[in-house]
Amino acid sequence: MYFLITMHSDPRFYDLKCQQVLPELDYIESLTKTFIHNGEVRTVKLASTSFMSGENDWMVSCPRKAIEQLRELDIHPFRTKGEAREFAKFNQLDSFRYLSI
């Protein structure tokens, strides 16, 4: 799923009326990911002072809780990047980027 966000370092999210909203999300500076690669369990610790890691992970303490907070503010995700792009085009948003979750 995709959210439309501003270009700010602390991004604002676009709601359904194309208003910029700055939610109070709990951003974190490090994240541990565990995955299986070639049959082996690997653990990687990521660090970032941005809202995204270099691996494109959303740096919030609990993504599900953050998404719920966004929904309460009338900020809803798009199923595809194409849907988000069409919404931005229809509403004449000039400056935005995508947050992929």
Image (cartoon, rainbow, N blue to C red):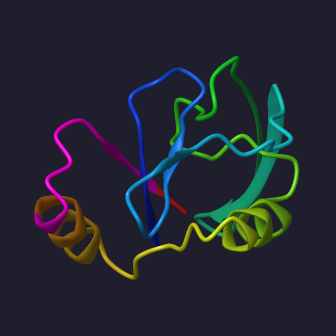
Residue in view at x 68 percent, y 73 percent? 71
Looking at the picture, tell me which residue is in the foreground, 17 or 87.
17
Residue in view at x 80 percent, y 42 percent? 24
Q: From the top left corner, tell me how far across and down residue 26 is, in percent.
A: 86, 41
Q: In the picture, residue 68 is in which quadrant?
A: bottom right
Residue in view at x 52 percent, y 49 percent? 13
Q: Is residue 60 left or right of residue 48?
A: right
Residue in view at x 44 percent, y 70 percent? 16
Looking at the picture, tell me which residue is in the foreground, 1 or 57.
1
Q: Is residue 8 above or below residue 77?
A: above
User: Magenta residues, as a range?
Assistant: 90-99
Looking at the picture, tell me which residue is in the foreground, 91 or 85.
91
Magenta region includes residue 100? no
Q: From the top left corner, tell me how far across and down residue 32 is, in percent.
A: 83, 43
What secondary structure do most residues of the magenta stretch adopt? loop
Q: From the top left corner, tell me how far across and down residue 41 is, in percent.
A: 78, 60
Which quarter of the rendering shows the C terminus? bottom right
Q: In the picture, residue 96 is in which quadrant?
A: top left
Magenta region includes residue 91? yes
